[in-house]
Amino acid sequence: MDATVIGAWVATGLTLFIFSFLYKDNPLFKLAEHLYVGVSVGYTIVKAYDTVIVHLIVKPIFEQGEIALFVPVAIGMLMLTRYVPKAAWLSRYAFAFIVGVGSGLAIPRTISSFILKQIEDTVRPLLSIAGGDGVIFSMNLLNPASNLNAIIILIGVSSVLFYFFFSIEHSGPGKVVARTGVLFLMIAFGAAFGYTVMARMSLLIGRLTDLIEFSDTSYGRPTLWLLILTVGVLVVLSRRKPQSEPPDLH
C-alpha cells in the first residue's frame, strides 16, 4: 500500500477521533490525544538532540575545533546537577548566568518594541507639510502613517493611560475620557480575540478540507469508513452499562 494512502487513513482516523470529543469524552479521543502528545514529545526530543547536541556541540568541537563551546556545555552540565541533591547548589550559578543573560537581551528589546515604539507612534505629527501644497491632512485609514491614524492613536493611548490613572476621580469630563479608554481597550481585546478565533478556524478548515479530499476513491474512502467505525464505537460505548461502584464497607 502506498505511504500516501496510509498517511491519509491515519490522518483521517486521528482527526475523527479528536472530533469525537464533541459528543463526549471517550476512549477514542483519549487514544488520539495520547498519540499526539507522545509523538510531539518524541519528535521534540529527537530534533533537539540532532540540532543542539550533534550540530551545535559535537560536530563544531570535534570537527572544527571550537573549544570555546565547552563553556556553554559546562553551564548545561551544571544545570543537570539540580537532580543530584548534594550537588544541587551548583545549578544556581548556571541559572543565575542564564537569567542574567536572558534579561540583558530581553529588556532592551522589550523597551524598544513596547515602549519606545509606542511613544514613536503616539508623537507623530498631526499635520504634514508637503512642498508647495503647504500643510496637508491625510485621512487614509489604510496608511498607518496617515494624520488621521496619528490622531486616533494619540486619543487611544491618552485615554487608556487616563483610565488607569486612579489619582483623579473619573467624573465629569474625566469620565468621558475614561470611557473612551475603555472603548479602545475593548476594541483591542476584541481584535486579539478575533485573530485567535480566525487562526483556530483556519486550522478547522484545513482538517475539514483533508476529510473531504480523503473521501476520494483513490485513497480508499477512509473518511467514509472511519466515520462509520467511529460512530459505531461511540454507539457501543454509549450502550455499555456503567460498572457499579463497590459497596461502602463503612
Image (cartoon, rainbow, N blue to C red):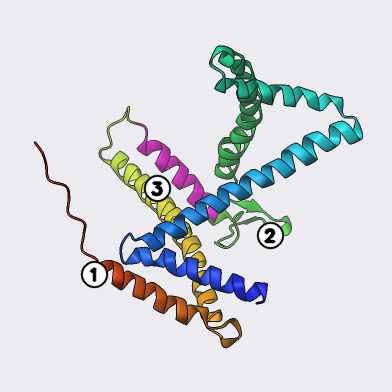
Q: Residue at x 62, y 23 (%)?
A: 79
Question: Residue 80: where, in percent of width, then height?
Answer: 62, 24
State yes or no: residue 30 in magenta.
Answer: no
Query: Is residue 8 depicted above or below 26 in this figure?
Result: below
Which residue is denoted by mark 3 in the rendering?
A: 185
Which residue is denoted by mark 1 in the rendering?
A: 239
What secondary structure is found at the residue carrying circle 2?
helix
Of the residues shown, which amino acid type is indicated by label 3? Leu
Question: Which tag, 1 or 2, sits closer to the chain's start?
Answer: 2
Q: Residue at x 83, y 24 (%)?
A: 68
Q: Which residues are magenta?
A: 149-165
Which residue is denoted by mark 2 in the rendering?
A: 133
- The answer to whether 248 appears left or right of 37 in the picture is left
What secondary structure is found at the residue carrying circle 1?
helix
Q: CA distance from mark 1 to mark 3?
A: 50 Å
Q: Residue at x 36, y 32 (%)?
A: 165
Q: Is residue 204 visible?
A: no
Question: Residue 127: where, in percent of width, then height?
Answer: 59, 51
Q: Nearer the viewer, residue 21 or 247?
A: 247
Q: Residue at x 56, y 12 (%)?
A: 86
- The answer to whether 165 appears left or right of 66 in the picture is left
Q: Nearer the viewer, residue 147 or 197?
A: 197
Q: Quadrant of residue 236?
A: bottom left
